[in-house]
Amino acid sequence: MRSNILFFIALITSSILFSQQPFGKITLPLGKVEIADKEGKWTRAKPNQKVFEGYILKTHARSRCEMTLTGGGKIRLGENSELELNETEVKPMAKSFNANLKKGNVWVSAKAAFGEKKNIAVRTPTAVAAIRGTKY
């Protein structure tokens, strides 16, 4: 009986953990690029590493990073930048991404298929930018 309860708890926990969609994946970390997970633990970024909501990307001097978004598009961080990944929602014909640039600079390119709705917003300390076309 007790083993059945433990199995059920493990099944629910694993389904919650694995059902979360990745925000994207790191495609090109150059120099010293770090990622903080939801618990605030910093690790060095690796190519093809998945990143999720609540993660923070940080680049140091003479470093930069490129991330491919789930469902298409790219985000590039310049040196001495910090980007918090707030929200992602990927559905068959609608994709939504929301991030907060704490410092530094960012370049975003979004590709949307015909008829697909894509909403990408990046908040900065001085402004909010959202993609209506393809790049900003």
Image (tube, rainbow, N blue to C red):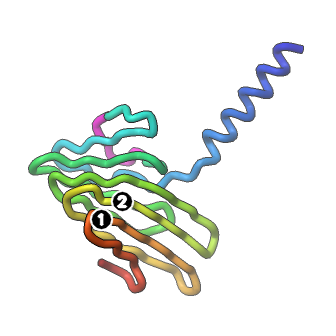
Identify the residue position indicated by label 2 in the image: 100
Q: Amino acid at mark 1?
A: Thr
Where does the image place residue 117, in percent across and percent down from the top left?
55, 79
**Position in image of residue 21 (x %, y %):** 56, 52
Instruction: Indicate whether residue 44 is drawn in magenta.
Output: yes
Which portion, as a residue range, is magenta? 43-50
Question: Which sits in the foreground, 74 or 52?
Answer: 52
Q: Do residues under tags 1 and 2 come within 8 Å of each other at their CB atoms? A: yes
| Residue where numbered disc 1 is placed | 124
Q: Quadrant of the N terminus?
A: top right
Task: Please tell me which of labels 1 and 2 falls first in the chain.
Answer: 2
Task: List the single residue furthest toward the front.
Answer: 126
Main secondary-structure element of the magenta-colored stretch: loop
Q: Identify the image quadrant of the C terminus.
A: bottom left
Few, some or many residues within 10 Å of mark 1 (<14, 14–19, 20+): some
Percent across and percent down for residue 84 are 36, 53
Q: Where residue 135 sits: x, y (%)? A: 32, 79
For residue 100, side relative to residue 28 (left or right): right
